[in-house]
Structure formats: C-alpha cells, structure tokens
Amino acid sequence: MTKKILLSVFILPAVMAFAQQYGGMWIPTELNEKEMKDLGMKISAKDIFNTQKPSIKDAVVQFNGGCTAEIISPKGLLLTNHHCGYGQIQAHSTVQNDLLSNGFWAKNPDGELPNPGVKVDFIVDIKEVTDFILEGTDNLVEPELAKKINKNIEVYKNSQKIESYQSIIVKSMYYGNKFYAFTTETYKDIRLVGAPPQSIGKFGSDTDNWVWPRHTGDFSMFRIYAGKDNKPAEYSKDNIPYVPKHYLPVSIKDKAENDFTFVFGFPGKTTEYLPAVAVEKIMKDIDPARIAVREVALKTLDEKMRTDSETRIKYASKYASVANYWKKWIGEVEGLKKSNAVEKKVMYEGSLVAKNHEIKTTLDQLNKLYNDQAPYALNNAYYTEVVKNAETLKLAGDYYDYIASVESGKMEEKELTKLKSKVTSFYKDYSAELDAKVTAKLLALYVNKTAPQFLPAGFSKYKDENQNIPMIEEMSKNSIVTGRSQVNGAALTGDIEKAFSNQDKLIKTLKKDPVYQLYASMKETYMKTADPQFTSLQGKIDDLQKKFMAQQMATDKDRKFFPDANSTLRVTYGKVKGSTPRDAVSYGYQTHLAGVMEKYIPGDYEFDVPKKLIDLYNKKDYGNYKDKTGDVPVGFTATNHTTGGNSGSPALDANGNLVGLNFDRQWEGTMSDINYDPRFSRNIMVDTKYILFIIEKFADSKWLIDEMKVVK
Ligand code: ARG
Ligand code: ASP
C-alpha cells in the first residue's frame, strides 16, 4: 500500500511532464490513448475518430481551406472565429449596412446569408499508404524520385472508388518518409448566421494580437446547407440545413486549472525536427530580416492611417495581416532565445550521435549546406519580403509575369481574365502616393542590407530613403503600373479593358515604364545571383532533412514522434493552465468580462466596447453564464500545441464537450512552431460561456442556443 502510494506520487508528475515535452499534433487514427486517459480523458480514441460509426471528427471541418470550424447543433450550425469569417462578414457589409461594425444576427434560418465560393471539408477517412506510394522508388534520386511518387499517387487515387462530392488527397508526412491518404467531402452552401460587432469579435485588435491576457470574443457562426438528400449541393434556396452525423454538445461548466482539454483541427505548418543550425539561422538571420522589412512598411502605413480615415479603411485588413506575422516573428525569436532552442537541439543531436554515429555525417553535411546557403537565404528573405510589401513592386511583378507568359506563348484567355480581376481588386485598396513612400524606404533598406554581389548595377544610388522618396514619387507619377499614367487611352486602375485593348502597345509601354524597369532589374539580378544557388542548396537540404528525420525516428526509441503540421486533421491535448513567462510575472488561465471593462477606451478603434455590453456588465445581467467568481469568463489558456490553421478549432473537455474556441497563442510561446516549450507555450481560446452569453444576452438570439445541446 505505502509502496503503491509512493509510486503514484513519483510517477504521475513524470508522466505529466512527458506528455507535453515536445508538444504534439497527432494524426487522429494514431492517438496516444493511454496518455490522454492518464491526463484525464474519459472518452476513448474511437469516440474521437471512427469510420464505422459517428464520432467527434464528423463535427470538425476545414473552413474554406484555411481555418477550422465545428458543428454545434443537429441542424448544421457551425462555429468558427470572427477572424476566419471576416472576409464573408466584410463581403456583406456596405457603408449603410456595416456588419463589421454593427454585427449581424439572422432572426431565423430565412435570414441567413449565402456566401458563394465558401466551402467546408469533412474528413471521411484516413489511411496510411506509404508502401503503395513508395513502391519502386528504392533506387531513385531526385528528380526521378518525385516523378515516380507523383505517378504512384495518381495510380492510388484512380484505384479508389469515391462519390462525386468526395476527393482523395495524399500527403507526405515526416519529410517524405511516410504518406497518408485523406478522403474528404465538400459542402458548398455555407450561410452566415451571426457575428458580433468588431468591438467584441476583434476587441484589442493588433495591440492585443498574440497577447495574453486576452479579452476578444473572436467567434462567428455559419450554417451548412445540403441538398434534400443531405448530400453536398451547389447553393439553392431550396437546400436544407445539413443534418450532421455528430455535433458537439456545448459545456458551460466552470473550468479549473489542470482540466484535461484537446483541440481538434487543421494546423497549417510547423518545423519541429530541424537541426540546430537551421534554428539558429531562423533566429539570427531570417526572422530578423522579415521583421525589419515589415517594421518599415507598417510604420509608414500607420502614420498615414492614423491621420486619414479613408486610408485607414483601405488598408485595415492588409495592415492586420502584415502586422500579424511581423508580431509573431518577434515573439518567435524571443521565445527561441528564452527556451534555449539552439542549445537544446545541439544537446539532443549529441545524444543521437552517441547512439548512432552515422547521424554525425548527416549533421555535418546539413551544417555545411546551411552555412553555404546562408548568404543566399538571407537575400531570399529580404527580396521576397521587399517585393511583397512594396506594393508598387508587387504590381510590377504581376505585369512582369504577364509579359513573360505572353512572350513564351503560354498566356491563355482564362489566365488573362484572372490577372485583370486580381489587379483590379488590388487597386481598390491601393494608394499609389502612400506606397511610393513605402517603396522608397524599403528600397533603401534592401540596398543597405544586401551584399553588393546581389544588387543590380548602379543600385547604390538608392541607399538613402530620404533621397529615394522624391525619386520614387517621380517614377510612380510617370508609371502606368501605379495607374497614375495612361496606356491605350486609359489607366490600369480605371478602365482596365481599354488599357489592355492593344496588348502590344501595353507591353511596349510596360517595358519602358520606370517602376517596371526598377522591378525588372531587381528580379533579374535576384534570379541570376541568388535564386539558383538558394534553390539547389534547398533541394539538397530537403533530401538530408528526410534522412535526418528517419534517423531521429530510428534512433530515439523513447520518443513518440508526430509529423509536422501540414494542414491535415490533427489532435493535440493538454491541460488548462496559466504560465510564468518572465521573472515575477505570472499569468492566470482565465480572463473575465471585468477585464474587458478594464481595457475599455471609449471611441478607440481597438478598445471600444459596445454600449449594450456595458449595460449588461453594469446590471450584471449574466444569466447562466457567470462562473464561481460571479463574472462571465471570456478567454482561457491551455498547454495544447497549436498553430496557424487551428483558428476556429474546437477545444473539448474530457467528455468530448465543447469548452472553448481556439483562436491564438500567447506571444512568449509562439516559437512552438519550431520548438514547443511546455513552460511558455499556451493556446488561447474563447470560453464557451462568453460565446453563449453574447448570443443570448447581447444578440438576443436565444433561438440559436435552443438548437444546441447545452451541458450545465
Ligand atoms: N494571431 C492570430 C492568428 O494568427 C489572430 C489573427 C487575427 N487577428 C489580428 N488582429 N490580425 O492568426
Ligand atoms: N491565429 C492563428 C490562426 O488563425 C492560430 C495560431 O497561430 O495560434 O490559425
């Protein structure tokens, strides 16, 4: 008896620490059921993923190719983030009827708004198909290897019998060491049901983005519609609400620290198995380069956006997306330093080499390749970020590709139509005058940060941003790319058909265009001096990374490996937890409505609070939705290992009930894409109590709650 107690006291904490040692985004057919149960899970792996009977996976979908969403009623009601539905909410908004600012709530199903082009994908089945896909590849090297694999994938797909509304996607895992086939089912009639105003759904905006403590009600609601047979169908007003095989009960029970949770969704991309040298390059070269470029762009845009509201609206969404990863990379670099990621990897590599000396050869080669690649990789990072964030250069790039396509005889009518609509919609939110400034400053940065051998001849004249500003403004004024000058009697920003009416003339004019020429000299120099070396070294690195991955898996027998995220369905699990990210700083796991009021800045574009929410707060009109503190919980954190694409993912409790809606991570832990650290890495979720509180008390939409199965 005494021995037993002693054992459990000493073994249990060890098991807990191990569970999250490296994070984990597990393929749902390969769950660590025992460990999940040890951590508190009451359901079984079969309840999570089962092709024989309804399971939780039948309630989880990929939302429009990027985010995740989940079904929370027997009538196909779908929950995802506000920032995932943002494009659709914006598309239904006009100046007179601004759903972003005011929110939107359908009064009944008839009031739900269709969203042409939006789709959701279910995962019907997952099969490991490594043997089939790698058949006959033993003695092949690139490029023959890739060709044979692609051929095998085609053969595999053609051998499977599927419905017309299903697809098979084969994905490489562990850097080409394994392959999995996913059968997906796509529904295309997805209607907007409800969204809170931005002052709730995007509360805190960029200032609070990636930050804990957080008070954002980042949710929106849609509904899946199906044909009369409940099968996928194109939009029709006669379609009916989809009846799911499974939907998630919504729990409004109080949470406690250390409660078991798991997150089920579609994480986009991680790189957890890189060698130390690669992590060092990201930390010291690549991330800082990307941060520096975006910093200049954001600062220049911000100055104008703060004083001019037309610019603010035009650039709002672009600014948010540039700022999102700018801020993430800053957190990532800090987190890599703080978690000693490089030293940790070096030690780990030492332990692998001690077990298998061949790994030393792989690592030596990788070290050499990364060092050889470093100057090209740095130029690649600066070049790609500059031509993306200097929008005038980006536009010139579109026309550059257009000319290349015409001149090689590859331009098809369809592609031309696509290009015209792409630039037309880009011009809508583009200010040539403002971007001339951004371009001038980024050009100076590029010249100052780039080794001379990578710069076009004569580019040193652009090294001073103050001198660039009038120079680029002059180019911009005289350019058809910016729309400030005309071709064929029209501006590309105006009557684009007319501007394209004589393509020979358009191409001749472009080739003489000052902005076009500026871009062309950068692009051509990059393609000559850096890209071939960068790409060919990357090919060699990829081959060795595949080998290194296989060696890690074969050598570290104690470690359970999961494949890096690749936008396929995964389960991650952990515990509700706060953290201690810095000396003397400790974060609780839960925020409340009182915290929204603490951040409230009347009229502010980030921290305003709607009057009705203030009234509810003042009256403490919280219905069923307060917790033991008497306040409404808003957000909470846990140790789940998530990444971009997990936004909108359900956070579930030990019984498989929905307890939160994932939408972000805390800044101190964003290096989890490269080096998950259980001390600092936390995912951030909206509490289901806050979601239901907003729906019932703020939006007066109890009819939606009546559809759900609420667990009290
Ligand atoms: N950081 C979160 C995620 O990557 C939320 C982004 C949306 N919010 C924003 N303020 N940009 O994508
Ligand atoms: N906010 C991210 C998303 O949109 C989630 C994350 O990176 O943690 O998917």
Image (cartoon, helix red, strand yellow):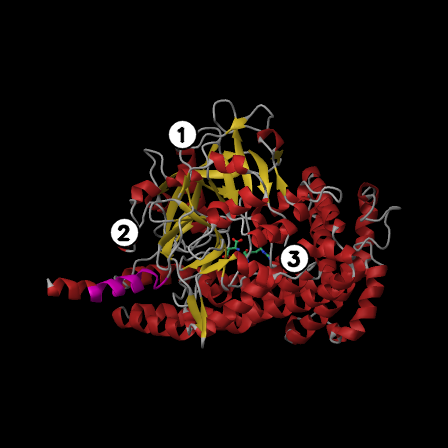
Residue assigned mark 2: 37
Instruction: Give the residue pinned by disc 1.
Output: 161
Task: Examine the rendering and report whether any part of residue 379 can be seen.
Answer: no
Task: Name the amino acid, label 3.
Answer: Asp
Label 3: element kind: loop
Viewer-nearest residue: 200 or 566? 200
> What's under tag 1, amino acid-wise?
Lys
Q: Residues within 10 Å of mark 2 (few under 14, many from 20)?
A: some
Vertically, is 352 above or below 64?
Answer: below
Q: Is residue 423 above or below residue 324?
A: above
Query: From the viewer's perspective, is 113 left or right of 162?
Result: right
User: Does the stretch in magenta take in 13?
Assistant: yes
Q: Earlier in the sequence, mark 3 or mark 2?
A: 2
Q: Quadrant of the N terminus?
A: bottom left
Q: Residue at x 67, y 46 (%)?
A: 102
- What amino acid does circle 2 point to? Lys
Q: Position of residue 20 (x, y in %)?
A: 35, 61
Secondary structure type for disc 2 = helix
Please check the rendered image and state whether residue 304 is part of the magenta-colored stretch, yes or no: no
- Point out the image quarter for the C terminus: top left
> Callout 1 environment at 10 Å: few (<14), some (14 to 19), or many (20+)?
few
Mark 3 or mark 1, earlier in chain: 1
Residue 698 on image: x %, y %: 58, 45
In the image, 168 versus 573, the foreground residue is 573
Q: In the displayed structure, would residue 684 be above or below residue 369?
A: above
Tell me which numbered mark, 1 or 2, is placed earlier along the sequence: 2
In the rendering, which numbered label is found on residue 608? Answer: 3
Mark 3 neighbour density, 10 Å: few (under 14) some (14–19) many (20 or more): some
Instruction: Please state the extent of the stretch shown in magenta in the rendering.
Output: 9-22
Does residue 513 appear left or right of residue 211 in this picture? right
